[in-house]
Image (spheres, rainbow, N blue to C red):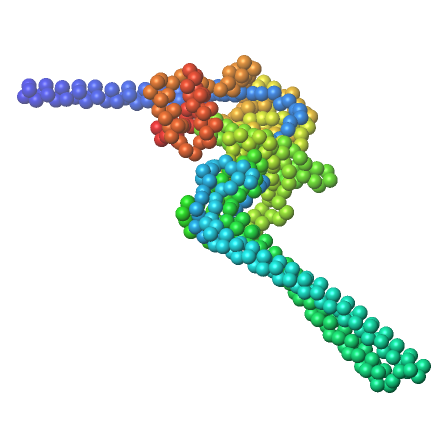
Amino acid sequence: MRFFRRALVGLFLVSVTIGLLALAGGTVWSALQSRLAEDGRAPPARERVFSAEVLTLTPGTETPVLTAFGEIRSRRALELRAPAEGRVVELSDAFEEGGAVQAGQVLLRIDPADAEAVLATAQTDLRDAENELAEALRAQDLATEDVAAARRQADLRIRAFERQRDLLDRGVGSAAAVEDAELAAATAEQAVLSRRQAEASAVARVAEAETALERMRIALAEARRSLAETELTAAFDGVLAEVDVAAGRLVSRNERLARLIDADALEVSFRISTAQYARLLEEDGSLPQAPVRVVLDVFGLDLSADAVLTRESGSVGEGQSGRLLFARIDDARGLRVGDFVRVEVEEPPLAGVARLPAPALGSDGRVLVLGEDNRLEAAEVALMRRQGDEVLVSVPPELAGREIVATRTPVLGEGIRVNPFRRDGAGQAEAEAPATIALDPERRARLIAFVENNSFIPEDVRTRMIRQLNEPEVPAQMVARIEARMGS
């Protein structure tokens, strides 16, 4: 009994202890809930300030540069075609791809045997015609003399007839003698007429001989021309391209053999939009002789040349738009026909505009202006031109001299407070300076070998690139582009 009593007392004490602990926990939980209910406001949040690069909006006069892409072409190019048919028996050493030729230089010769035979035949026919003409002239001279002799004889017969008639009138002659004299005079007149007819035939023979001689001379000239056409000569100084002929080959008349290009008379053709074309026009609607810069990018080494805008295409072309312009290149060193180049044309200057980085202008056409207490304000500007990574905007008078955000980010907007920082001139110069790197011998040798084995690089450009790669410091942009082409 004592054991049960003590167990019940222990169980009672445990129950009381658990109840007290539960009561204490409920009290503490209620106190916490009451405290949280009384302090329901969140603690005041601190305003977040972002850092942003700013620059001064300074309006001035800027010259926009119109950028387009075009192709190098020659102002004077000639297709070389076979002037005659036959076998090529002689070929100039310069008649090859890229061969330089001079004006009047014989490029190839076709077998002239047939043409020489025709020429010899024409010369023989000409001599025959000359002999025929000489014989006809001699016959004409004889016919003329024969007519003169017959006329003299007729005159004698007429005087004899007149004398016999006079004797008959004086009674000392006879009628038979008069009749005989008259018959002889008539016979002499008939003989003159026959001789004149022979003379006319001789004159006609001379005319026919002259015509035949002229025909033979024409045939001789044609034979000489045919013989001359067995030689193909260069019409002007230039370079050969698209060569497709070899010594011993049979060619047909007018078959295309090569293309002669004047490498010193190059121009660039490029297409621009109609709006860009309208901005280039003068007040009278004519196209200005504006300077043009032609740039060919070769592994980071830009080949540039100066050109002058000369003309525009007379028609737009089927399926095309805009305008096709042409610019004459003054010094085309390193450029070749068919190169795809970048063309930069200076437009008329714009006043009251500012040049800004492209990220400074939002898609809504507004910029973020630094206001009081370094808070940002949105202001609208007019976009005039896009120049690569920069834009030209028209600055209202109230924004002149104020600072704007150089690079907009998603966290920056109107009303945001920023911590501005400004880039000084030294920092800009340092950022814009071209970077160069030093190459180890193995890497330098690999780059030089790639440039030497690349047949698409012009010879003068290859020489300049190798010279730069041999220097202690090499432009990093050139190295990066060469290695990108190498696939490294």
- 318 or 132: nearer the viewer: 132
Name of the residue lying farthest toward the bottom = 175
Look at the image and tell me in which quarter the N terminus lies: top left
- 63 or 32: nearer the viewer: 63
| Residue 299 x %, y % | 44, 28
| Residue 400 x %, y % | 66, 23
Name of the residue lying farthest toward the top = 426
- 120 or 140: nearer the viewer: 140
| Residue 447 x %, y % | 38, 25
- 23 or 118: nearer the viewer: 118
The residue lying at 68 percent from left, 62 percent from top is 137
| Residue 110 versus residue 68 in the image, above or below | below
Does residue 365 appear left or right of residue 190 in this picture? Answer: left
Q: How many marks?
A: 0
Residue 17 seen in the figure: yes
Q: For residue 480, which quarter of the picture?
A: top left
The residue lying at 67 percent from left, 32 percent from top is 348
Does residue 279 appear left or right of residue 187 in this picture? Answer: left
| Residue 479 x %, y % | 41, 24
The residue lying at 53 percent from left, 30 percent from top is 333
Name of the residue lying farthest toward the right = 170
Q: For residue 352, which quarter of the picture?
A: top right
Look at the image and tell me in which quarter the C terminus lies: top left
The residue lying at 52 percent from left, 54 percent from top is 120
Name of the residue lying farthest toward the front = 172
Residue 395 seen in the figure: no
| Residue 8 versus residue 217 in the image, above or below | above
